[in-house]
Every structure is written in structure tokens, then in C-alpha cells.
Image (cartoon, rainbow, N blue to C red):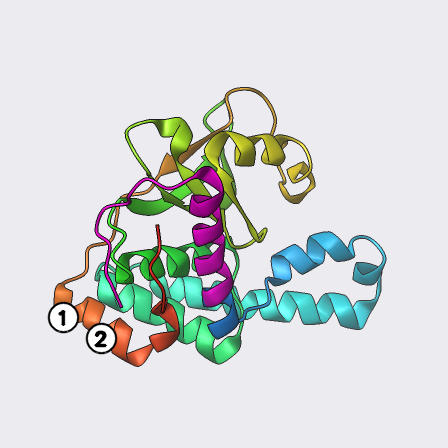
């Protein structure tokens, strides 16, 4: 596989297609059920069914337990191992876990100018939603957003517009206003040996084609 540390110029459609190809490949090898999203989509009919609601809550409790285990983890290697174990063993994850996995896959495949970001409204409130991103050049408008929870990819302005409109129903706080933005999170550093560990143990994260 050819590693590409710097994104080269390609057409808009090619860049977005590559980003979505990586998202779909990771999802195929690491399928998860986002029960928080299922709860949104099942409201109100299914959540009025007691057994269904209890099932959703029990799965979310497992996810919260894994997050509690990660709460005080300082070592990035241990952090990613916890996420991969949760996703591989329990087949559950929400936007935070899915975005971390996409970011790790990007880095494993040689994309260095990538990261994870959180959605913030105009008042500075975090909207409890995370995505992965790729900076294609110095123009922030050309930043590609990969949202594995909503199964979408696009340039930042396009994705933010969707958050304000068709995806607004998924947020507890209204995702509206021109001040809506994504704030990058500090990257978690891994050594070359740790990166190689994840490549070997989780080959589904390695994309078998040239990207970007």
C-alpha cells in the first residue's frame, strides 16, 4: 500500500469520494450500532414500548461504562485500544467512538493533516457531537468533514448547513445560527511502533487503495 503523508490535488468529487470510501470501509470492518441515533429515529413510537426502551438504555449503559473507563486514561495507545475493544466486542459506539476510529484509520493510512472536532454553537456551547476532519490545504473552507455517526462526508460549509437543517433533529440544543462551527480537539500522539501495532492487529483499518 502506498502511504500518502500529504494530500495531493484532486477534484472535489474525488476527494469526497475518497473520504467516504474510507468511512464505508472502516464501517464494513467495524460495524457498530449507534443506539443514541436509533433512539432519535425511533421516537416516539418504539420508545413507548417498554422492552425496546429498556434495550436501548441497557446498550447505552454499556457504552457509558466504557467511556467511564477511558475518563482518566492519559496514554493515547491505551485510549485507542479501549475504543477498538468496545467497538469490536460490543459492536456499539456513538459519534465520539466512531470519529476516533476514523481519525485513527486516516493516520494509519498516512494522512497526517487530520483530526477530530466537536460541534459548537454560536454561544460556545458544545452540542455533544464529534466528527473527523481532513485539512486539504490552508483554505479552511476546503476542510473535509467525515461524520460516521450520520454517515455523511462533505466540505465543512456543506456539512454545517446540513447540521442547521436536515440534521438539526439529532441535537438536544438547536444546531442553528451562523456561528455554528467545529472546534478541533488536541491530537493523541502515537509512536510508529504503536501505529504498526494497530495496523497488524486491526487490518480492517488499512485501506488497500491509494487515497487523496
Please indicate, yes or no, whether residue 71 appears anywhere in the rendered image: no
Residue found at the very far top of the displayed protein: 178
Above or below, 128 against 52 in this view is: above
Within the image, what quadrant is residue 142 found in?
A: top left
Within the image, what quadrant is residue 102 found in?
A: bottom left
Q: Which residues are magenta?
A: 1-25
Quadrant where the N terminus sits is bottom left
Is 16 a magenta residue? Answer: yes
Q: Are marks 1 and 2 in contact (CB under 8 Å)?
A: yes
Measured as percent of width and height from the top left, residue 181 is found at: 46, 29
Please indicate, yes or no, whether residue 127 appears anywhere in the rendered image: yes
Q: What residue is at 62 percent from the left and 71 percent from the top? A: 58
Above or below, 202 against 101 in this view is: below
Measured as percent of width and height from the top left, residue 154 is found at: 51, 41
Q: Which residue is mark 1?
A: 193
Which type of secondary structure does the marked residue at label 2 adopt?
A: helix
Mark identifier at residue 197: 2
Amino acid at each position: 500500500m502506498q502511504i500518502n503523508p500529504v494530500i495531493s490535488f484532486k477534484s472535489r468529487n474525488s476527494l469526497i469520494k475518497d473520504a467516504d470510501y474510507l468511512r464505508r470501509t472502516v464501517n464494513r470492518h467495524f460495524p457498530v450500532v449507534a443506539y443514541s441515533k436509533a433512539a432519535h429515529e425511533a421516537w416516539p413510537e418504539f420508545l413507548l414500548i417498554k422492552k425496546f426502551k429498556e434495550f436501548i438504555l441497557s446498550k447505552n449503559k454499556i457504552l457509558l461504562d466504557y467511556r467511564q473507563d477511558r475518563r482518566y486514561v492519559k496514554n493515547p495507545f491505551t485510549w485507542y485500544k479501549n475504543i477498538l475493544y468496545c467497538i469490536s466486542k460490543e459492536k456499539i459506539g456513538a459519534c465520539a467512538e466512531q470519529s476516533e476510529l476514523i481519525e485513527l484509520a486516516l493516520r494509519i493510512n498516512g494522512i497526517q493533516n487530520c483530526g477530530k472536532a466537536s460541534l459548537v454553537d454560536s454561544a460556545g456551547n458544545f452540542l455533544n457531537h464529534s466528527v473527523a476532519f481532513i485539512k486539504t490545504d490552508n483554505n479552511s473552507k476546503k476542510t473535509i468533514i467525515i461524520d460516521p455517526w450520520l454517515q455523511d462526508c462533505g466540505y465543512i460549509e456543506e456539512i454545517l448547513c446540513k447540521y442547521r437543517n436536515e440534521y438539526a433533529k439529532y441535537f438536544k440544543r438547536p444546531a442553528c445560527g451562523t456561528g455554528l462551527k467545529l472546534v478541533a480537539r488536541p491530537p493523541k500522539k502515537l509512536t510508529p511502533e504503536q501505529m504498526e501495532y494497530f495496523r497488524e492487529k486491526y487490518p480492517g483499518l488499512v485501506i488497500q487503495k491509494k487515497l487523496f
